Amino acid sequence: MSKETAFEAAYKLLNRSIIRYQGEPIGTVAAIQSSSLVAVNYAECFVRDFVPSAFVFLMQGETDIVRNFLKTVLTLSAQQPVMRGHDRAMGLMPASFKVVKDIDNNDRIVADFGERAIGRVAPVDSAMWWMILLRVYVVTTGDQALAHSPEFQQGMRQILQLYLKESFETSPAMLVPDGSFMIDRRMGVAGHPLEIQSLFYGMLHAAQDLLIANKENETLLATAKYRMQTLLSYVRFYYWLDIKRLNEIHRFGSEEFGPDAKNLHNIYPETIPDWIDGWLPEGMGYFIGNLGPGRMDFRLFSSGNLLAVMFGLATEDQAEQIMQLYDHHWDDLIGNMPLKLVYPALTGKEWSMMTGCDPKNVAWSYHNGGNWPMLIWMFAGAAIRSGRDDLAKKAVSQAMQRLHQDEWAEYYDGKHGDLIGRRANLNQVWSATSLIVANDLIESPNSMVLSESLIFY
Ligand code: GLC
């Protein structure tokens, strides 16, 4: 099968996935499948899943659907239902939405803010992705008027008010419940997960460009800028792990009280997992998955790391070291189908405690060490930003044939991603669109503006 055939099929899937409201395109479904095995909500448009679809549309000059999507999600966020007895904060955006017919056969949009989702999780990442996408839309189309309209300015203010509101944080990192982002089930990712911090940084960066610098926005913009800077230095130092830092942690003193503490989070060296011994060669490193009192989650989460590279949350040197680590551990981290969402998997007691015995998240499956093709656009973006186009090319050529043959599977199981995920959907739209975006970032001149707007400098 030729490369052209694979990409033709990917575009075909994208075009079949379009959702319309009163005849206008407003989004794309998560997956197209007739099988009854598929969860009902895969026929909805998920905000995070739509992002790579939007990039493809923008590169093709089909900007209407992206504009309609941005408007729709903004309107929906003003119509949140009351959640089990308490009012919801304005500024939260839905995880997903669908178009249904009412009794008069008129189109109606129904959103899910977590009140229908499995585990009733709050989609903290949605508003972040929305604002990052809005910036990409504005840069690629030049349609600044949309972001400057009173509704969009008001919507962005509400998001920032919610996301910058002081709560129980003791650091610049954002505190969230389990499953509040792409990993939308219990997976021991409560606290300060890296992916949320990278998206937070990306969103605050986007807000600086999108909010008009007037009197009304002055304080919010200043708070956003300050938080962005403190978050940047905090993540770059405290989340970073290389052999030098591992040595420091290995010899950490503990129970340090007062302002001069070196071991700020009171991490006991005994919590360093066995797998890391010998796994981190000189000149390579990554950001750990989570950080809190007495807790370092040493797992490597790909999206948080790759977004940190793309958005410039990582220093240039850290970015190079992260990509070097992927290169060095290619079989473990990229595998047969790019690439690992989390490495390594939780097993045994740890799995039962952290996932709540979730059978979908058994070791080396789904969110717990499965391989996700949708990560390939982030991998390509990060590789390109750090001058490792060779890695992006290798991953894309590896994924292309098989993904097409496997009918755009949602995820893969196994230590090296050899097996189609046991409960994976087929025709998963972001598996196809992410491949197109990755390939375009490498090859197509149309993607120049996309990479400039995505990769913040
Ligand atoms: C799963 C994923 C989530 C995704 C959704 C739709 O729930 O965990 O991140 O948005 O499927 O594809």
Image (cartoon, helix red, strand yellow):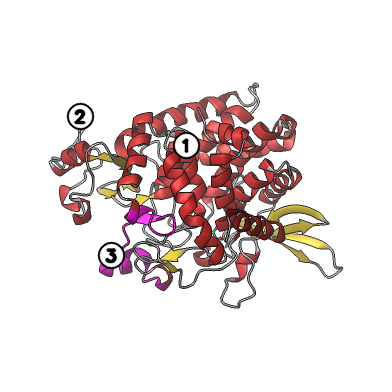
Among numbered discs 2 and 3, the one appearing first in the sequence: 2
Report the amino acid beneath label 1. Answer: Ile
399 sits left or right of 332 in the view:
right
Q: Earlier in the sequence, mark 1 or mark 2?
A: 2
Query: Which badge, 1 or 3, comes first in the chain's sequence?
Result: 3
Q: Are marks 1 and 2 in contact (CB under 8 Å)?
A: no
In which quadrant will I find the N terminus? bottom right
Query: Nearer the observer, disc 2 or disc 3?
Result: 3
Residue extending farthest to the right is 104
Which region of the structure is painted magenta? 331-359
Q: Residues within 10 Å of mark 2 (few under 14, many from 20)?
A: few
> CA gap, disc 1 to disc 3?
36 Å
Vertical arrangement, residue 329 with respect to residue 84, above or below: above
| Residue assigned mark 3 | 350
In the image: residue 56, left or right of residue 201: right
Secondary structure type for disc 3: helix
- The answer to which of 265 and 423 lies nearer the viewer is 423
Picture quadrant of residue 266:
top left
Residue with the mark numbered 1: 384
The residue depicted at 62 percent of the width and 35 percent of the height is 445
Numbered label attached to residue 326: none
Q: Which residue is mark 2?
A: 260
